[in-house]
Image (spheres, grey):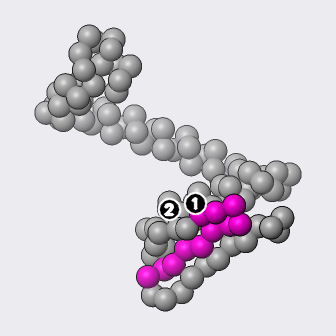
Amino acid sequence: MGLAARSLGCLPGALARVVEKSIELKSDRDAARRMIVDQAEQVIVEQLTDAASIDRRDDAAKFVLTSLGKALGWGAQATSAAGFSMTDGGGRTLQVKWQTD
């Protein structure tokens, strides 16, 4: 929004308010966001299925579990160099530790 606002010679907050008031602009903004999310999902799927790059695959899996996994009942994550853990709110915890630790 910042680049668009600068191009129009206004502040980002002012542009955001104009967009929020316009059904057409909000629809265009939401469609652009969906397109960007779709592209990002394609990258994540490629990384998850890339057997040649285990580090990228692990990072992609961590991202999916800690973001999309929330919708499936996984709660907040705790990250560290040693790995990460997540709870499902029902007393179950998934803990991932990297083999290099």
Q: In the image, what residue occupies the spot 23% across and 15% down?
A: 10
Q: Is residue 42 above or below residue 13?
A: below
Which residue position is annotated with label 1?
Answer: 64
Is residue 63 rendered magenta in the image? Answer: no
The reply to whether residue 19 is in sight is: no
Q: Nearer the viewer, residue 87 or 81?
A: 81
Q: Position of residue 54 (x, y in %)?
A: 81, 56
Is residue 80 rendered magenta in the image? Answer: yes
Is residue 60 left or right of 18 when viewed as pictured?
right
Q: In the image, what residue occupies the spot 64% across and 44% down?
A: 43
Q: Is residue 18 above or below residue 93?
A: above
Q: Quadrant of residue 90?
A: bottom left
Which residue position is annotated with label 2?
Answer: 68
Report the label total.
2
The reply to whether residue 41 is in sight is: yes
Q: Is residue 101 above or below residue 16?
A: below
Residues tagged 2 and 1 counted as in contact (Cβ below 8 A): yes
